[in-house]
Image: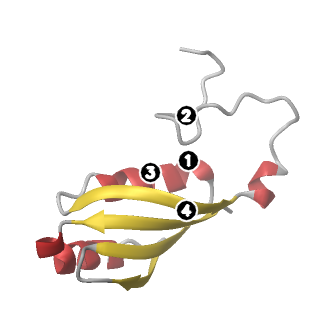
Amino acid sequence: MPIGGFIVNAVPEDLEVAVAFLTAIPEVEIHGHDKGGNIVLVIDAPDSEHMQRVVKKINDCASVLTVGLTYLNVEDEADTIPAGADVTGIFHGGPASGSAG
């Protein structure tokens, strides 16, 4: 189960809209925000692909300017990946395909 810390930069004038949007996402826990549009949050997802979908959903919000990863822990998920497996697709634009594409 990956857990990631993020800084989301929202349009300052739309901060409350962004906070309301983020609060409605079950995997998101907001830890604080400031008047400049910076929002500190944690995403707790069942797997990396799910986390990637949540990040994309946040990034697609019109009130959000950027989504920055500050911390990521995937130890329990990493333990399930076979040694030498190609996981280049995780957090790089799509699911791992096994090809360089």
Q: What residue type is labelled 1?
A: Glu
Q: In this view, does 1 lie to the left or right of 4?
A: right
For residue 53, the mark is 3
In the picture of the structure, the residue carrying the numbered disc 2 is 95
Q: What residue type is labelled 3?
A: Arg
Residue at 60% in and 51% down? 48
Q: Are marks 2 and 1 in contact (CB under 8 Å)?
A: yes
For residue 70, the mark is 4
Please identify the quarter of the rendering in which residue 17 is found: bottom left
Residue at 33% in and 59% down? 58
In the picture of the structure, the residue carrying the numbered disc 1 is 49
Q: How crowded is mark 1: few (under 14 residues within 10 Å), some or many (20 or more)?
A: some
Q: In this view, does 92 lie to the left or right of 32?
A: right
Q: Is residue 17 left or right of residue 67?
A: left
Nearer-N-terminus badge (2/3): 3
Residue at 82% in and 48% down? 80
> Which residue extends farthest left?
13
Mark 4–mark 3 Cα distance, whole angstroms, equals 17 Å
Q: Do the residues labelled 3 and 1 touch (CB within 8 Å)?
A: yes
Q: Is residue 92 above or below residue 51?
A: above
Nearer-N-terminus badge (2/4): 4
Please identify the quarter of the rendering in which residue 47 is found: bottom right
